[in-house]
Amino acid sequence: MIEGFTALYIFMLAAFTGYEVISRVPVILHTPLMSGSNFIHGIVVVGAMVALGHAETPVEMAIGFVAVLLAAGNAVGGYIATVRMLEMFQPKKGD
Protein backbone atom coordinates (compact mmCIF):
# COMPACT_ATOMS: atom_id res chain seq x y z
CA MET A 1 0.00 0.00 0.00
CA ILE A 2 1.12 3.57 -0.63
CA GLU A 3 2.24 5.40 2.50
CA GLY A 4 1.49 8.87 3.87
CA PHE A 5 2.95 11.73 1.88
CA THR A 6 3.23 9.71 -1.33
CA ALA A 7 -0.51 8.99 -1.29
CA LEU A 8 -1.27 12.64 -0.47
CA TYR A 9 1.02 13.80 -3.32
CA ILE A 10 -0.69 11.46 -5.81
CA PHE A 11 -4.13 12.61 -4.66
CA MET A 12 -3.23 16.30 -4.96
CA LEU A 13 -1.65 15.77 -8.38
CA ALA A 14 -4.72 13.88 -9.64
CA ALA A 15 -7.08 16.54 -8.27
CA PHE A 16 -5.10 19.38 -9.86
CA THR A 17 -4.78 17.58 -13.20
CA GLY A 18 -8.49 16.69 -13.25
CA TYR A 19 -9.49 20.26 -12.48
CA GLU A 20 -7.23 21.67 -15.19
CA VAL A 21 -8.47 19.21 -17.82
CA ILE A 22 -12.17 19.66 -17.03
CA SER A 23 -11.97 23.46 -16.73
CA ARG A 24 -10.60 23.71 -20.28
CA VAL A 25 -13.45 21.73 -21.88
CA PRO A 26 -16.01 24.01 -23.59
CA VAL A 27 -19.48 23.85 -22.04
CA ILE A 28 -21.05 22.52 -25.23
CA LEU A 29 -18.74 19.49 -25.22
CA HIS A 30 -19.00 18.63 -21.53
CA THR A 31 -22.09 16.39 -21.66
CA PRO A 32 -21.03 14.34 -24.73
CA LEU A 33 -17.57 13.82 -23.25
CA MET A 34 -19.06 12.86 -19.90
CA SER A 35 -21.39 10.33 -21.49
CA GLY A 36 -18.51 8.90 -23.50
CA SER A 37 -16.43 8.36 -20.38
CA ASN A 38 -18.97 6.41 -18.32
CA PHE A 39 -16.66 3.40 -18.34
CA ILE A 40 -14.21 5.43 -16.21
CA HIS A 41 -16.88 5.72 -13.53
CA GLY A 42 -17.00 1.93 -13.35
CA ILE A 43 -13.24 1.79 -12.88
CA VAL A 44 -13.53 4.32 -10.04
CA VAL A 45 -16.17 2.15 -8.34
CA VAL A 46 -13.93 -0.92 -8.61
CA GLY A 47 -10.96 1.05 -7.25
CA ALA A 48 -13.02 2.27 -4.30
CA MET A 49 -14.15 -1.28 -3.57
CA VAL A 50 -10.56 -2.53 -3.69
CA ALA A 51 -9.51 0.24 -1.30
CA LEU A 52 -12.39 -0.67 1.02
CA GLY A 53 -11.33 -4.33 0.85
CA HIS A 54 -7.83 -3.42 2.03
CA ALA A 55 -9.06 -1.22 4.88
CA GLU A 56 -7.98 -2.34 8.32
CA THR A 57 -9.05 0.33 10.80
CA PRO A 58 -12.58 1.64 11.32
CA VAL A 59 -11.55 5.06 9.97
CA GLU A 60 -10.19 3.48 6.78
CA MET A 61 -13.38 1.44 6.45
CA ALA A 62 -15.55 4.55 6.85
CA ILE A 63 -13.53 6.47 4.25
CA GLY A 64 -13.67 3.47 1.90
CA PHE A 65 -17.43 3.16 2.35
CA VAL A 66 -17.92 6.86 1.56
CA ALA A 67 -15.65 6.44 -1.48
CA VAL A 68 -17.78 3.56 -2.77
CA LEU A 69 -20.98 5.57 -2.23
CA LEU A 70 -19.61 8.64 -4.01
CA ALA A 71 -18.18 6.59 -6.88
CA ALA A 72 -21.47 4.74 -7.36
CA GLY A 73 -23.36 8.04 -7.32
CA ASN A 74 -20.95 9.41 -9.91
CA ALA A 75 -21.54 6.39 -12.17
CA VAL A 76 -25.32 6.60 -11.85
CA GLY A 77 -25.25 10.34 -12.51
CA GLY A 78 -23.21 9.81 -15.66
CA TYR A 79 -25.71 7.34 -17.03
CA ILE A 80 -28.66 9.58 -16.12
CA ALA A 81 -27.02 12.48 -17.94
CA THR A 82 -26.44 10.24 -20.97
CA VAL A 83 -30.08 9.14 -21.06
CA ARG A 84 -31.28 12.74 -20.78
CA MET A 85 -28.92 13.83 -23.53
CA LEU A 86 -30.07 11.03 -25.84
CA GLU A 87 -33.72 11.92 -25.18
CA MET A 88 -33.05 15.36 -26.66
CA PHE A 89 -32.36 13.71 -30.02
CA GLN A 90 -35.52 11.58 -30.08
CA PRO A 91 -38.41 12.80 -32.23
CA LYS A 92 -41.33 14.11 -30.22
CA LYS A 93 -44.43 11.89 -30.14
CA GLY A 94 -46.65 14.51 -31.77
CA ASP A 95 -44.27 15.05 -34.71
Image (spheres, helix red, strand yellow):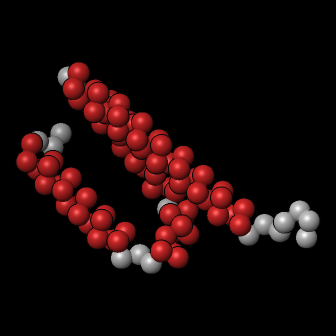
User: x, y percentage for residue 91?
Assistant: 83, 68
Report the quarter where the C terminus lies: bottom right
Q: Residue furthest front?
A: 94
Above or below 26: residue 85: above
User: x, y percentage for residue 57?
Assistant: 20, 22
Q: Nearer the viewer, residue 55 or 22?
A: 22
User: x, y percentage for residue 10?
Assistant: 18, 55
Q: Does residue 57 appear in this view?
A: yes
User: x, y percentage for residue 75?
Assistant: 50, 48
| In this picture, residue 75 sits left or right of residue 65 | right
Report the quarter where the N terminus lies: top left
**What residue is at 9 percent from the left and 42 percent from the top?**
4
| In this picture, residue 31 sits left or right of residue 95 | left
How many labels were placed on the picture? 0
Q: Nearer the viewer, residue 80 or 68?
A: 80
Q: Quadrant of residue 25?
A: bottom left
Q: Residue furthest right?
A: 94
**What residue is at 40 percent from the left and 48 percent from the top?**
44
| In this picture, residue 48 sits left or right of residue 41 | left
**What residue is at 11 percent from the left and 50 percent from the top?**
6
**What residue is at 42 percent from the left and 36 percent from the top?**
69
| In this picture, residue 67 sits left or right of residue 83 | left
Q: Nearer the viewer, residue 95 or 19?
A: 95
Q: Residue furthest left?
A: 5
Q: Does residue 50 appear in this view?
A: no
Above or below 79: residue 37: below
Q: Residue furthest top?
A: 58
Q: Nearer the viewer, residue 14 or 51?
A: 14
